Amino acid sequence: MPSSLAALPLLFAENAPAAAPAAGSANSIQQILPLVLVLGFWGYFLLFRPQQIQEKKRREMISSLKKNDRIMTTGGIYGTVISVDEDQDRVVVRVDDDKGVKLTFSRTAVGRVIDPSPDKPAN
């Protein structure tokens, strides 16, 4: 008859734990991929797209500058456009009407058009 002490280890034996799935398994990728895609679309439409629209409006405003437009530069100087030189990317602005002070700026230095000159009606 076998000794009762020989069966003692069998009483305390447990089933081995199941192996956990590997961190790089296809199952975890399928769970994370939709979240990454949603965050990517969210970032594009909330961060990048509005900035692109604003930059497009700014380029249109700069390209439509014409004589007698009232502008404010990015430095805060108010004036009236005297001439626009598209070849050299310059704008001549009259800052003081009484003394005739004129300054030359790059077209990109125009911050906003305050009062666009009215278009002359065609006769």
Image: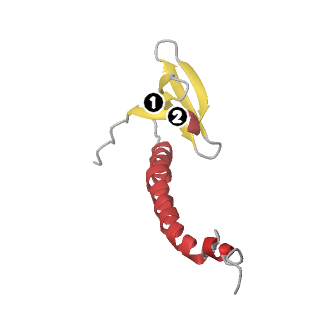
Q: Position of residue 62 (x, y in %)?
A: 50, 43
Residue 11 location, x and y as percent?
61, 74
Residue 107, horizontal then vertical, whole percent:
57, 38
Going from N to C along the chain, the mark reached first, 1 or 2, is 1
Q: 106 or 121, which lies in front?
A: 106
Q: Nearer the viewer, residue 60 or 80?
A: 60
Left or right of 21 on screen, residue 110: left
Which label is found at residue 110?
Answer: 2
Image quarter hosting the N terminus? bottom right
Badge 2 element: strand
Residue drawn 45% across the image and 44% down it: 61
Relative image position of residue 7 (x, y in whole percent): 67, 78
Report if the CB atoms under discs 1 and 2 are less than 8 Å apart.
yes
* In the image, residue 102 above or below residue 62: above
Residue lying at the far front in this picture: please name it. 1
Badge 1: residue crowd in 10 Å (few <14, some 14–19, many ≥20):
many
Q: Is residue 86 left or right of residue 96?
A: right
| Closer-to-camera residue (96/112) | 112
Residue 55 visible at all:
yes
Colouring convention used in this rendered image of the protein: secondary structure
Residue at the top extreme of this rendering: 99
Residue type for callout 1? Ile
Q: Is residue 101 above or below residue 18?
A: above
Amino acid identity at mark 2: Val
Camera-nearest residue between 60 and 1: 1
x 68%, y 73%: residue:
9
Give SS at disc 1: strand
Q: Which mark is residue 71?
A: 1
